[in-house]
Image (cartoon, rainbow, N blue to C red):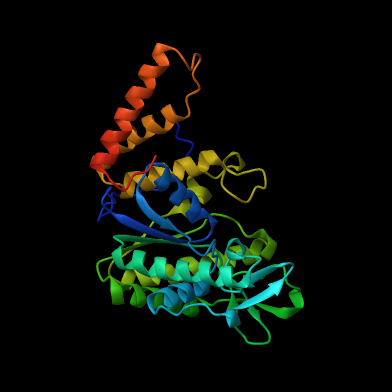
Amino acid sequence: MMDFQTKVPIDRQMPAITYDAKTVLLGSCFVTHIGAKMGYYQFQNLVNPFGIIFNPYSIALLVERAINKRLFTADDLFFANGRWHGYELHSDCSRTDRDIAIKSANKGVLKLRKDITEASHLVITLGTSWVYSLKESGSVVANCHKQPQVLFEKTLLDVATVRAQLEKIDALVKSVNPDCAIIATVSPVRHLRDGMVENQRSKAHLLTALHEVIDTTAKWHYFPSYEILMDELRDYRFYADDMLHPSNVAINVVWERFSNAWIAEDAFDVMKRVERVRRAQQHKPFDPDGEAHRNFLKKLEEDINALTTEFPHMEF
């Protein structure tokens, strides 16, 4: 029988992610999918406290802020379209009140530092090598916040610059947590607004720099999410309606490959128990006042109590 897929081989990795592990996930929108899956199964994780960040330069800048406790001030924000924004932050962090925006951003700074210090694993997903810099200051921005294009200059980070940002992240993380395992991946989301060829150049720079770091730096690991979408699932069936982002089916396939590689084997039974509770919570009873439903709710409560007693961090 013919095999119509070229499977990307992925060995089991160590140190495995257990229910005692703490994982920080930073980067492009693709990392939010993995983080959502981990959250669904009640693993301990922090996902993009400053919103989605696409380029390695901006990720490194925020990690530096967190590790050095360099808090945001009013000078780091600007007002536009009724909200206060930060060029280092995603629009999810924008607020109508400046003081609230600063307070929220700094809460993220301190939370990220604490979680990196305690993390067993850090997952970084790189989206693009293309960056926008403010012409006035030369500062690279994480998000343009729909400001006039004339304010920015667009450039492609070369391999050496991308590598330097990754090495900066490595040094910062190891300064507070030398045992943290770093799992790096390149987002399979295609940035076609940059252009077809330009997107490929961008991904090539990320991949080259990333593997140079992994080949020479301890504690770094590569997860081939980009290759899974490009080679193993090379069909538009596995993309969303925009033909750029992975579909739910593709996300589930990548999550399955990720969990088989990184999740501890003894965690899978717990994941099944969590899954049963999640599904039971979504159950719509035929007879809400009937004895069968009362027994169902009693069993559900017992299952939740058993899990939260064994794993106090879980919340249902």
Whether residue 15 is visible: yes
Image x and y of residue 222, in percent? 37, 60
Whether residue 7 is visible: no
305 up-or-down from 123: above or below: above
Left or right of residue 138: residue 109: left
Left or right of residue 188: residue 211: left
Image x and y of residue 29, in percent? 54, 56
Left or right of residue 44: residue 36: right
Residue at the outermost bottom position = 137
Kindly identify the residue that appears in the image at 54 percent across and 65 percent down.
Answer: 53
Identify the image quadrant of the N terminus: top left
Q: In this figure, what is the number of numbered marks?
A: 0
Image x and y of residue 4, in percent? 49, 36
Who is closer to the viewer here, 190 or 299? 299
Kindly identify the residue that appears in the image at 33 percent across and 38 percent down.
Answer: 271
51 up-or-down from 7: above or below: below
Left or right of residue 39: residue 176: left
Quarter of image, res 87: bottom right
Identify the image quadrant of the C terminus: top left
Kindly identify the residue that appears in the image at 34 percent across and 29 percent down.
Answer: 301
Image x and y of residue 240, in percent? 62, 44
